Structures are given as C-alpha cells and as structure tokens.
Amino acid sequence: MQLANRRCLQARASGTCRRVSRARVAVVKAVKTADGPRVAVVGVTGAVGQEFLTVLKERNFPYSNMKLLASARSAGQKQEFEGHTYTVEELTENSFKDVDIALFSAGGSISKKFGPIAVKDGAIVVDNSSAFRMTEGVPLVIPEVNPEAMSHIKVGKGGAIIANPNCSTIIALMAVTPLHRVATVKRMCVSTYQAASGAGAAAMEELRQQTRDVLDGKPAQPKIFPLQYAFNLFSHNSGMDVELGYNEEEMKLVKETRKIWNFESVRITATCVRVPVMRAHAESINLEFEKDISEAEALEALAAFPGVSIINDRQNNRFPTPLDATTKDNVFVGRVRRDISRDDKKGLDLFVCGDQIKKGAALNAVQIAELLL
Ligand SMILES: NC(=O)c1ccc[n+]([C@@H]2O[C@H](COP(=O)([O-])OP(=O)(O)OC[C@H]3O[C@@H](n4cnc5c(N)ncnc54)[C@H](OP(=O)(O)O)[C@@H]3O)[C@@H](O)[C@H]2O)c1
C-alpha cells in the first residue's frame, strides 16, 4: 500500500487526517488492491456485520480479498459489496486459512470458539463481542483514546486478538476522555437510554412489529426482550448479578473503563435502561474530577477531541438526540453544565448520544483495523 495512503488511514483512525474530508469519505469506495489485507467479516448478515460493509466502503478501506461469513442458515445468500456479488459462506474451522484481518460480530460463543482458530491461522481478530475484552494481554481499544495499547500488533506480524469495547463504554469514553485528560475523573455516574439496535437486527424488528401491533390495538408479543418494548422502557436485559444488583451492561462500563484508561481506582456506577428508540444510545453522565474544571474548559476540550460533535444550545433548548447521532460517525455531546449539587468546581453533567452500531461497534472496529496496516 502506498505510504501516503497508509499514513492517512492511521491518522483517520485517530481522527487527525486532513487529506480526506468527511464529505468525500461518504462517497469514496473501499479499495480492492493487490497489496491490501485479506479481510473476513464474521456475522455479516447481522446488524453490526451489515454496518461493517458500509463503514469499510465509507472509509476507503484497502483489501485484496473479502470473505463474508455467517451461520449455515445464511450460507449461499448473495451480498453486494463494491459492485461485486459475494456468496455468504458458512463459518467453519477452515474459514481463516487465507485471512489477514477478521472482523467478528457473531456473538461471544462464536468468538470464543473461532477467534483462537483464526489467530492460529495467522489472522488478526477484531472482536465485537465481550468474549475477550477483559482477558489479560488482549488490547481493548478506542482508537481516539488508547491506540498505544495495540501498537505492537500489525498485519504480517502474526495473529492476535483485539477487543472492541462495549457500545455504551465507547460512547461514554468518547465524551469523557477529553475531560479526564484535563482534570482527571475521580468518579463517574452513568445512566443510559439504549436503543433496540444494540440487541441486533431481530430486536429492531421486534420494536417495529410491537409498535405496529399496539397502534392496531393488538397485544405486543415479546420474543427477544422479556417485556413489552413498544411504548415502554425497562432495565437492561443483560444478566443480573442478584447479589450486587448490577446487570452485565452496567459492569462492562465499570470494568472496561478501568482497562481502557489503565486507571484502576476510578469509581464508576451505572444504571442501564433499554428505551424504545430504533438506533443510537443516549447517556446522562455525572462526573467528579480531581481538579477544578469550568464549562468553558470542558467545551474547549470536547471541541478539540476527534470524533466528538457538540450540540449545546441552551437558548433554544437544543441538545443531542439519538436521531442526531443515527448513522453518524461522531458522538454528540451537550447539556455541559456545572453540577450544582457540589460546593466546589469539580463536578460536571453531560448528555451524550452515539450510534452504537457505528461508533459503538463497526466504525470503532474498522478504525482499529486501519491501525493494523
Ligand atoms: N448491535 C450492536 O450495536 C452491537 C454493538 C457492539 C457489539 N455488538 C456485538 O456484536 C455481535 C453481533 O451483534 P448484532 O447486533 O450484529 O447481532 P445480530 O444482528 O443478531 O447478528 C448476529 C450475526 O451472527 C451470525 N451468527 C449467529 N450464529 C452464528 C454461527 N453459529 N456461525 C456463524 N455466524 C453466526 C448471524 O448469522 P445468521 O444470520 O446466519 O444467523 C448474524 O450474522 C454480538 O456479540 C453483540 O454483542 C453489537
């Protein structure tokens, strides 16, 4: 690959590339090139898998070969990508013999079984599931935040696994890391408003169907979620630690933040809630800092951080919404305000929205893949 192109891909992963504008990125195609890596998308028929294809195209990702993998249910399906018709193949133990980068989004059990097989065959796995996030030695990376954690892993230097953080963690840390760098976060309290898309394509269809049914006067029929989703909200559907009273989604925010920041002593609490929004999560975040930080300093740090957009118009009561973030690369931040419950100047509140299929999953993973080149 040409050096200029490689440098730009690396700079784009960390948000500093000036060579390719956002507007241009939206229309360019991925580059099929003889010296590009051989890429596999595992779980290509799912919500994240489909987004992988969109993001690879949008970001002009170079590849010499593309392999699309899913379960036996989807094997033989046709999938258009870059003007070619690909046939979806069944994921098997022999799928990775000719693969350099494998983008996994087929669930934790598939990652646990096939991730090590791919690594043995020399592929670098970028994994969207939670299977390896807390495994020692596996980098957990948000390219704008901690790219150094994976600097030893490159295409051509052997197989490895890199974990993509949980979507709520990515969205929170895109907003909070620039402030952490200014004043050091001591304690973070997060309340999430999470969309259907976070639970995959079938959950999105459940929200659509239940909404139609309820409007037609029919009973809603829960299948993916245990409770009625349309016109309702409920505590996140991940497994609950009955002793502690926290669910897995909440504990991911706690544990993953500590690993990504390499900062074990940061105190975090979270309440994660599923809301009937189709796509893009929202999070209300209260922060306590070691040092004073003003609203102006916070807004300045946020404005300078790659991948963050600010919507903070108090006069017009206009702040980020999930629809602002839907299909967008950036995380949107607003309601930046001093925490008036404190007597010092060490507290801020924020409201954050991000598309969790995009920055919370596929985009973050493709940015990681760019750093591998
Ligand atoms: N949705 C999000 O926003 C999000 C964000 C971050 C991380 N993630 C993670 O990404 C993963 C996928 O999520 P999703 O939302 O895309 O789910 P999804 O829409 O339900 O898609 C699941 C994908 O996995 C494939 N799959 C299932 N069983 C398989 C098997 N035995 N062998 C090969 N492929 C298999 C499915 O293929 P078939 O169509 O053939 O069944 C489908 O392509 C999960 O680990 C999830 O936690 C999702």
Image (cartoon, rainbow, N blue to C red):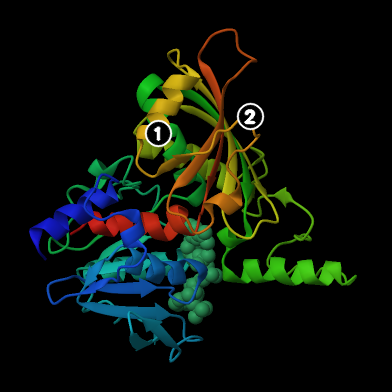
In the rendering, at what x and y percent does residue 190 appear?
A: 58, 35
| Mark 1 vs mark 2: in front | 2
Q: Nearer the viewer, residue 339 or 238?
A: 339
Circle 2 is placed at which residue position?
A: 315
Examine the rendering and report whether any part of residue 128 can be seen.
no
Quadrant containing the N terminus is bottom left
Q: In the picture shown, does residue 2 fall above or below 359?
A: below
In the rendering, at what x and y percent does residue 218 appear?
A: 88, 72
Q: Nearer the viewer, residue 25 or 127?
A: 25
Q: State the residue lying farthest toward the front.
A: 315
**In the image: residue 29, left or right of residue 72:** left
Quadrant containing the C terminus is bottom left
Circle 1 is placed at which residue position?
A: 303
Task: Name the secondary structure under disc 2.
Answer: loop
In the rendering, at what x and y percent does residue 6 appear?
A: 15, 58
Residue visible at 51% across and 86% down in the picture? 73
Residue visible at 26% across and 51% down in the picture? 12
Residue visible at 27% across and 66% down in the picture? 60
Q: Marks 1/2: CA distance?
A: 19 Å
| Sooner in the amino-acid sequence: mark 1 or mark 2 | 1
Q: Which mark is residue 6?
A: none
